[in-house]
Amino acid sequence: MSVQKMPLMKNANPQLLSSTPNGARRFWRFLMLATVIVCAGLAGCVVMNGKDTTTSGRKIDDATFAQVVPGKTKDFVEALLGEPSEKKTKEDGTVQWRWRYSERHDSNTGFIVLFASHSSSTMTQNRYVEFKDGVVTREWTE
């Protein structure tokens, strides 16, 4: 009885296709290593993105604040703008009200393993109204 050898494929690597246990082990090691490398590379492409906005105080738009003009009363101003953040009386008897508004934007971006960044910006608005004898004498924004 004679044993016939099966011809190998023309371009096949005989070491990887070898039916010996050593060749099979080498092929599986290669395959596992390739899988680990591909997975590690993909992990670096995961994107994290987070945005957060924090506010404090009351934001007063320009159109609303434009209604506060000299001659208006404290009652009118409080009804229009709400309770101020701060009330201060000066030595000369004038009263100064302040509305403070603050807005903070935080942004976090990251590509796992490769890159991470954080940025933050803060905008603050102060609106002031000054009264003498309960009547607006001036108003301004800082």
Image (cartoon, grey):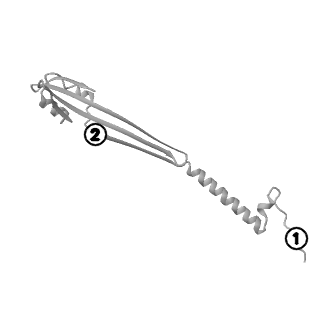
Is residue 64 visible in the rendered image? The answer is no
Q: Nearer the viewer, residue 130 or 63?
A: 130
The amino acid at mark 2 is: Ser
Q: Which residue is mark 1?
A: 4
Q: Which residue is mark 2?
A: 56
Which residue is at a point 69% across and 62% down the rendered structure image? 29
Q: Quadrant of residue 125?
A: top left
Q: Is residue 111 left or right of residue 67?
A: right
The amino acid at mark 1 is: Gln
Which residue is at a point 79% across and 58% down the rendered structure image? 13
Tell me the quadrant of the picture where the N terminus can be found.
Answer: bottom right
**Helix, strand or loop for disc 2:** strand
Disc 1 + disc 2, Cβ < 8 Å:
no
- Mark 1 vs mark 2: in front: 2
Q: Measured along the vertical axis of the image, is residue 63 above or below residue 116?
A: above
Is residue 125 visible in the rendered image? The answer is yes
Where does the image place residue 52, in percent across and percent down from the top left? 38, 43
**Helix, strand or loop for disc 1:** loop
Q: Quadrant of residue 33?
A: bottom right
Q: Measured along the vertical axis of the image, is residue 118 above or below residue 26?
A: above
Q: Quadrant of residue 56?
A: top left
Q: Is residue 122 left or right of residue 132?
A: right
Q: Measured along the vertical axis of the image, is residue 61 above or below residue 115?
A: above
Q: Measured along the vertical axis of the image, is residue 4 above or below residue 81?
A: below
Q: Which mark is residue 18?
A: none
Q: Nearer the viewer, residue 15 or 4?
A: 15
Mark 2 Cα within 10 Å, few/some/many (few <14, many 20+)?
Answer: few
Tell me the quadrant of the picture where the C terminus can be found.
Answer: top left
Residue lying furthest left:
133
